[in-house]
Image (cartoon, rainbow, N blue to C red):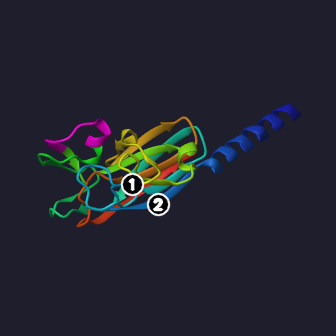
Amino acid sequence: MKSTKIALLLVLFVGAMTAQAQQDVQVFVPGNASGGFGNPIDQVVPLVAALAAAGPGTITVTYVSGTVTDSGVVDTGPNGVPWDEPGLQFPLQEAKGVSRGRVNNLDALIGAFVPRSRVDHSGFNPIDGTKNLTRVGLLPSRLFLIGEGITLDVREAGTLFLGINDMHVGGNSGGFNVEVTGP
């Protein structure tokens, strides 16, 4: 009987510790936070630090509300809108190493998960690290589409950054309210 009580207390303690380890934050991502990704760029606004994850686990991002209106007077939700703009490169296109043609998600909600070792590096800034804009920055290959929501499995400690899939953000307004949950 005594060992059963101890086992039950241990299960409750571990469950409580796991529940305490989860973070739940509300984040606003402004419509101009593109991190300087894409080409050409008119303004460099860092991506927003949404969640510093303590270690392995699952991060969930859920769109709550808001729209982005860009300088082309396109008004959209987190999935973005199709846009045909020859000669330009949007952030998610830069992530794939392509440019020109149709983009399926202009002004969509995007993200990048960056390991703690890079975030903690002296001089780190959550902007494009390939354009000599910062000593240590984000790599385009880390960008991914979030849209209305995503669940990510992360293997290590790091920070989730959020932004907008647009390269001409000087005239953008609005933004997205999201909920982020993770370890």
Residue at point 11%, 46% (across, down):
86
Where on the picture, by quarter, is residue 65? Answer: bottom left
User: Label 2: which residue?
Assistant: 26
Residue 171 position, x and y percent, is 23, 67
Looking at the picture, which amino acid does disc 1 mark?
Leu
Q: Which residues are magenta?
A: 93-103
Where on the picture, by quarter, is residue 170? Answer: bottom left
Relative horizontal placement of residue 76, taking residue 49 as reference (left or right): left
Near mark 2 (Cα within 10 A), the count class, few <14, some 14-19 or many ≥20, is some
Relative horizontal placement of residue 130, taking residue 76 as reference (left or right): right
Q: CA distance from mark 1 to mark 2?
A: 28 Å
Between disc 1 and disc 2, the foreground one is: 1
Can see residue 150?
yes
Q: For residue 133, which numbered disc appears in the image?
A: 1
* Callout 1 secondary element: loop
- Does the magenta-highlighted stretch encompass residue 96? yes
